[in-house]
Image: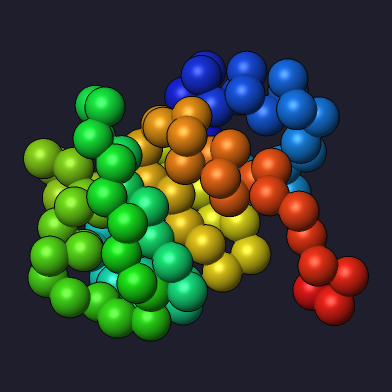
Amino acid sequence: MSCSRVSRFLDAHGIKVRETVPASRKLGKPEAVALARSASEIFVAKGKKLERFEGGKSSENVVSRMLGPTGNLRSPALRIGKVVVVGFNEEALARVLLRPRSSTS
């Protein structure tokens, strides 16, 4: 998670990161497919544009949005439970990270 904006957002809200995978690991299409299939919901931010996809699928459309021009998973990519957020978008992070949690989760 190399994005300083994400780090500032997490710090501001007191959210601790459990695991960090360095971008140098160069996660590619197979990892993006696995991530998409394991997710219940996927948010992909590019610039000010935010797209939401239903998880559990690995359509070419979703995976291509998750990958950058080099074919690697875009950064930052966060997995919060079964929700995946790719790219920085404060609205998506707030929606996923700051929503009330049910006591049964």
What residue is rendered at 85% in x and 77% in y?
A: 104
View extreme (right): residue: 103
- Residue 45: percent from the left, percent from the top? 31, 39
Left-right relation of 19 to 27: right
The foreground one among 81 and 22 is: 81
Q: Tell me the quarter of the picture where residue 46 sits.
A: top left
- Residue 83: percent from the left, percent from the top? 52, 62
> For the C terminus, which image quadrant?
bottom right
Left-right relation of 5 to 11: left
Left-right relation of 51 to 18: left
The foreground one among 55 and 68 is: 55
Indicate the colouring scheme: rainbow
Q: Tell me the quarter of the picture where residue 29 sits.
A: bottom left
What residue is rendered at 12% in x and 65% in y?
A: 61
The foreground one among 54 and 64 is: 54
The vertical placement of 15 against 86, above or below, is above
The vertical placement of 63 against 46, above or below, is below
How many numbered marks, from 0 up? 0
- Residue 3: percent from the left, percent from the top? 47, 24
**Visible in this render: residue 90?**
yes
What residue is rendered at 51% in x and 19% in y?
A: 5
What residue is rendered at 12% in x and 70% in y?
A: 60
- Residue 78: percent from the left, percent from the top? 51, 48
**Visible in this render: residue 26?**
no
The vertical placement of 31 against 21, above or below, is below
The vertical placement of 28 against 40, above or below, is above
